[in-house]
Image (cartoon, grey):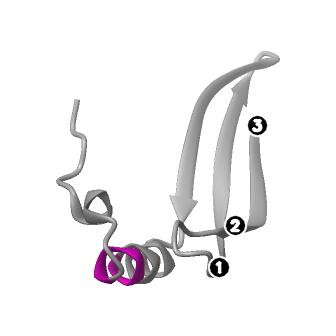
Amino acid sequence: MQVETIWIETNFGTDGVKTSAEGGNLIQIEWGRVTSVCIYPDTAALERTLQRIAAKGTTEALAAPITS
């Protein structure tokens, strides 16, 4: 069975600006157990937020992705 969820999140960046974004999750369930969860965030909204807070001095906002 597959379950799809759509969500909207709101928060405040380190610069105090309230932002919101939406996304979805796709969850695979087999024999009553979750076997996978795929997360599909709005990466364009995230990129805009990271660029904005980096411009205001939060250098970690533009750090290289964690790949491990």
Q: In the drawing, what numbered circle is on residue 11?
A: 2
First reached walking from the N terminus: tag 1 or tag 2 = 2
Q: Could you tell me which secondary element the residue under label 2 belongs to?
A: strand
* Rendering coords of residue 21 (x, y %): 64, 75
Q: Which residue sits furthest left?
A: 64
In the rendered view, would you say 50 is above or below 59?
below
Q: Residue 49: percent from the left, percent from the top? A: 46, 78
In front: label 2 or label 3: 2
Q: For the magenta stretch, what is the residue range?
A: 51-55
Q: Amino acid at mark 3?
A: Met
Against 57, residue 24 (above or below) is above
Q: Residue at x 55, y 51 (%)?
A: 39
Residue 52 magenta-drawn? yes
Helix, strand or loop at disc 1?
strand
Magenta stretch, overall SS:
helix
- As drawn, the residue found furthest toward the right would be 32
Residue 61, placed above or below residue 28: below
Q: Position of residue 42 (x, y in %)?
A: 53, 73
